[in-house]
Image (cartoon, rainbow, N blue to C red):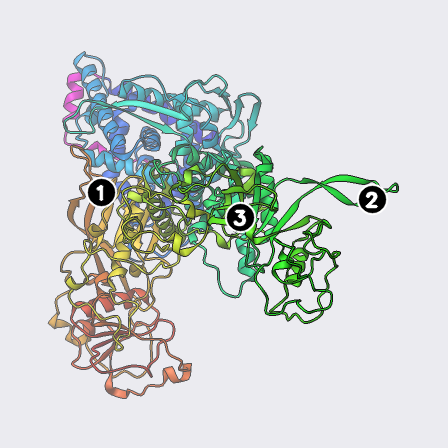
Amino acid sequence: LIQQRIHSYQSMASISKFSTALLSVPNEITLAAANSNVNFSLMKFEAPPEFHGLRDALSRTRRHEAEEGMPHITARCLGALFETIIPQIPRITVAYGTRVSEICAQLQLKTQPTGMFADQAGADGTSIWAAATSGQHAIAMHLLSCMLARIWKPAEATSLWVELVERRKQEIFKDYNSSSATGISAIMAAQQLFNREQLSAWDASARSWLQTADTTKRFQQTQLMLIINNVRMPVNTSKDPYDSIISAWKSGLSAMESLLQGASQRVQDGAILLAISSWHLYPNMQVLSDLVKDIDMSDDLMTHSILTISTSGTSDSRDGVFWSLPLSRMRYYSPALVSERTLASDTSRITMEEFHIVVLGAFVSQWKTTCSDEIRCCKVIARIYQAYQGLLRGQQRPLKIPKWFNLIAAAAHRVLDSSGQMQAQYHKLLKLGSRRCGAFLHDPEYTPPTFFGLGYFHILVRVLKDVEARISFLRCSAVNRSMNAHSLVIRYKTEQMISYMYASVVPHCRTSHKRSADAITTPSAGHKRFAIGRRAKSEVSCFGVEGCGCTDPNITDCLCRDHNVRCTTTCHPNQECCYCPYPLLSFDCQGECSEMQRCVGCYNQDLIRHMEVGGEEVTLIHPEYLDVVDEYQFCIRQSEKQDPHTYSLLFGHGTLAAIYQIQPEISYDTYNQDVSNAPSATIEEIESVVYSDSFDPSSLELETCCDHWLGDGMVQTCCSLDALTFASELYGSMPGATVSIEIMAFPMYERAWAIYRQRLSTPSANPKRGMWWHSDTDEQATIPANEGPKSDWKSIADNFDEEIIPETLDDPKSRNGLKDPSSEHSHASRFVLLDGARMRLSRSFACVAWFDSGEFDLFVNQLNAVMALINGNSIYVASALLSDPSIPPSGTPITRVFGNLGRSEMSLLVPPVDPRLAELDLSSWKHINHSHFTGRLQDCFSSTSLHLTFTDSEDTVYLGNRGLRDRQVVFLEALVSIDDRGKHIGDLDILSMFSKPTFEVQKSCSHTPEERADVLLGCRLIAIDNWDEFLDPPERAAIFRANGNWQARLGAAAAAIQMGMETLVLSAKRPCLQCLKMTGVDMIIA
């Protein structure tokens, strides 16, 4: 069948050549024919049958535009203008039409709410169908538009189209003036006027189709982009825009036609790769690099074709296929600026989940001083998340974890759990974030703590919940750092003990208590513990107890002597008494010690027993041998004969466990030491902690990435993570939406919508961090009021609905008719315009504008009246426009509808200032009954629907790009109209309805279905069963019966508010007539 179609197109091509030959008559006759009044651009061809699937999928409005409107004129004129230089492409026509119809068939399986956007919803195949009904040459022009739209931005592509058309016209007139034979169609096309808006719309339709097809053919497209990313070659080297584009286009057409014929091709430049990515026809590939890789693209349309690509000889540092051209028609007054665009994985559109992986890469790029392996960093994040989940399952009260961390952890798991093609894609996105997005979260001038602060030893020690695990970790860290371990000592504290204890860092030589058969002791090495013996007198002492009469005044400097007890083996484990005339006793308490008050002997004995871990020796030190200088320094000696040593904190947690190092003298400047001077943990040390069974992540301060990071860097990062969470929540309820990866080139914290929350006040420079950062003492950690944040930073992930409205954006006092949300009479407190609700919608639109475009940073207060945003293949609509007026928008304030307006600019739809309802028709009196309500709720408005129209009023949003010929963002005045059986009822401003004090929604109640249906009002209500009755309302309360019809209910509620009625909307799911309050209500929407 395909071969038959190809022969058919070849026959048509022969006829076309013959016709062209017939028309190649003397130029005088040709020009006379061209000046005739026949508008050849409206001529239509029978579309190839392969495109009929597209025809069936188009909406009636789009199909009419493609066959009769400006898209058809553009396609026909462009096809005629370039007809003589277009190669024959019968196989491409068959394959491309089949692919387009296949994509449309898959899209039709998906349903979505469209409401008033029904005419704009669906895939934008307008330019494709316009080309298909304008001849084979017009199809080739559409393929060119896809190539340009793939790699160039809208304004750039439009400028290139203008140059192509102008240069082609010049060629035609040059041939005519040189007396060369010229076809009538070419002359006629050259005399047509092409305006920028026309060419811009042509580009916009192709651009929207690319986004749609990319999503549908995601598997092959991703695989192709992974290959292209390693190619590194230009489309071609020509610097003339016209020659370069025509050469790339014809090269792509010829190569693709040969591939479809079954002839293998070898990539000579990037043109064929650009064509493949633009036309979604995927030949099997053989990639020549270090190894020869055969890649099956799984495309049924190209099973017999092989494209050979060599990557071994590419020396350019740029990834992918790149194209550099001068753009002389983009600005009104400017030299031709050379612009370069690249087709690679980092120039594609990605999903929000993939965007999280890029952010993850940017996040871990800050940790390169500790670990440059991104995958290793991901494993640490995944382990921290796993530990958090273990705590959540075991705790009675919820553990507060910022949502941004859940997003980052989910991205890490996605990278680690992926395989095959998706693993390669994710790794490239991770590398992209790490390599190029270091300034996305905060200014690179600021260096955040690595691994959420785990690079600090005091935090590493703190997250270990077991004291022995802390000691073991500190010992390993000291040994691995090749320190002079004999000059170090560990000071630590347990929950059971009030005073500090000490431990050796490395084993010390000691004499074993075991003897050999010949009674010779064998030397051994082991760790030692040291404790400060108890010196203060207990309420219960051993004085007078039998065996405890050691009161010889010659005994000095002994713990036993201080407590009037006889020297024991407890205090003297080495059998050396302090000149005591009595032999050492093995002390046993006589039973007079209570659990709360023990004698010194019992205390010291318990202390030793508690410290004897793993056979380590324990030595008691007299308290007078310890001199604590401050919290971070102490002097100590083990006996009277030993010289004291001064120890200063080296690293660790000053109050839990830390390593102290011998210093030559006492320092009196410990509080002025900077945190940067402290040693940092290695990745191996961090891993040993997080993978430990003793790891407890609840001590991490994730809210600020680290509890000891202050200043602008922390504020910027928190702002970026706050914005990330907001955007993720927003896009989470918009399936199918993609984002531009180009946003990673701009700092997120500088976006107007990202700093919408009240910013923290920040110091001009990072404050000095004293030695107190080794501890958790609140008093020491307090920041002076003039040096730190003046308000708490809370993640929007945990308080998504709590907005802080800057006074510069919106003054709550300036709103007229604002309802008090605390009023007990309000039925719709959730819909009252708490200023944050409308501002949250504006912020959401600003967020979407930036993510979808990759560049447009709109001010929030510019968008207060916006009800929809359209860009690419997406219509982002305020959710309230697509749902019943009694149901609050679920999850987020915006809903995505798949579709577009066919415009190149980003369009912001706003309602007119004062929309009007239809005038009252006095002749409609015969339709007005105003019957009494019988209690039956039914839908009397099944023919009512909402529609979208435009008033032709447009305003350009100034973005600072002065001198551009093309607009980038525009406000379009749009009317949401309500129609019934083809009759126009009126135009509505739906969003403002929710801010009116006359609008109420019935509260939910506990009445049973029988009670809810019981009518107590009797004949007090008038039933409204048609629009004539609504527009000429009765003098008493009425009930609009459109049960289950959300469009009619929404339109009636908005119309009633515009008519000044007190309006009550009954619940859509559980309407209750029992709860009706008649006081002050004019219209009830049922």
**Residue 364 location, x and y as percent?**
45, 39
Report whether residue 802 is seen. Answer: yes
Q: Which amino acid, mark 2?
A: Arg
The residue indicated by pointer 1 is 969
Sequence order check, earlier mark of 2 and 1: 2
Identify the mark at residue 896; answer none if there is no mark: none
53 sits left or right of 756 in the view? right
- Cα distance, mark 3 to mark 1? 53 Å
State which region is magenta. Answer: 25-48
The residue indicated by pointer 3 is 461
Q: Nearer the viewer, residue 74 or 633?
A: 633
Decide whether residue 28 is among the magenta residues: yes
**Residue 506 location, x and y as percent?**
63, 39
The residue indicated by pointer 2 is 515
Q: How many discs appear?
A: 3
Report whether residue 872 is seen. Answer: no
- Location of residue 186 with respect to 1011 vertically, above or below: above
Circles 3 and 2, Cβ within 8 Å, touching? The answer is no
- Location of residue 539 with respect to 854 vertically, above or below: below
Residue at 18% of width from left, 11% of height from top?
178
- Location of residue 403 with respect to 275 vertically, above or below: below
Sequence order check, earlier mark of 3 and 2: 3
